[in-house]
Amino acid sequence: MTYSVSSINNIEIERKFLVKDDSYKRLATGQVRIQQGYLCLNPNCSVRVRRWNDQGFLTIKSKAGENGFSRYEFEKEITVQEVNELLQLALPGRVDKVRWLVPMKEGLTCEVDEFLGENEGLVMAEVELPDEQMEFERPAFLGEEVTMDRRYYNSYLSQHPYRTW
């Protein structure tokens, strides 16, 4: 089936950046531990299960559109027990990280991920936008933008850990 990302309502618009320093920690209003695995990875979509502290989620994401930062996302809350059961079916390779939540001036939240395990050493930030054209003031800790670099997708990191680069 072929579709236009712009014709679907559940669109995630996200920009990714490397992080230059740990100044985000003093600006953060909270943090969460995230562990996730992938049930399916193919060129058109990924299916993941995620434990977010004591919550669980099943998420399906399409490949990114032409601009590289808009894509379809379907997410449904599931129980932690269901996450644990589905992780037994997951592909080898997990993503484990601590996410710091940093409020921004525009009412946005910058999510800074400190990766653990095989991806330890990687610190990356994501900013979800309501509109592809939206401009925002970048916090000082944001470094190089890596939105277009597929190596920084969690799905890629699950199969090609940062430590092996």
Image (spheres, helix red, strand yellow):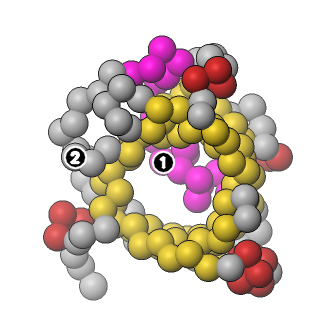
Residue extent of the magenta highlight: 138-160
Label ID, residue 46:
none
Vertical arrangement, residue 81 with respect to residue 138, above or below:
below
Position of residue 100 measured from the top left corner of the image (x, y, whole percent): 63, 37
According to the picture, the residue beneath numbered tag 2 turns out to be 131
Q: Quadrant of residue 27?
A: top right
Q: Residue furthest front?
A: 29
Whether residue 157 appears in magenta in the rendering, the answer is yes
Q: CA distance from mark 1 to mark 2?
A: 21 Å
Q: Earlier in the sequence, mark 1 or mark 2?
A: 2
Q: Quadrant of residue 43?
A: bottom left
Q: Three-letter amino acid code at disc 2?
A: Asp
Q: Nearer the viewer, residue 165 or 123?
A: 123
Position of residue 141 measured from the top left corner of the image (x, y, whole percent): 53, 18
Vertical arrangement, residue 49 with respect to residue 35, above or below:
below
Identify the element where label 1 is drawn.
helix
According to the picture, the residue beneath numbered tag 1 turns out to be 150
Q: Residue at x 38, y 38 (%)?
A: 108
Image side of residue 93 versus residue 70, left or right: right
Q: Three-letter amino acid code at disc 1?
A: Arg
Quadrant of the drawing holding the N terminus: bottom left
Image side of residue 23 versus residue 12, left or right: right
Q: Nearer the viewer, residue 130 or 149?
A: 130
Q: How many marks?
A: 2
Whether residue 132 appears in magenta in the rendering, the answer is no
Q: Residue at x 56, y 75 (%)?
A: 77
Vertical arrangement, residue 81 with respect to residue 153, above or below:
below
Q: Nearer the viewer, residue 115 or 24?
A: 24
Identify the element where label 2 is drawn.
loop
Q: Residue at x 66, y 25 (%)?
A: 25
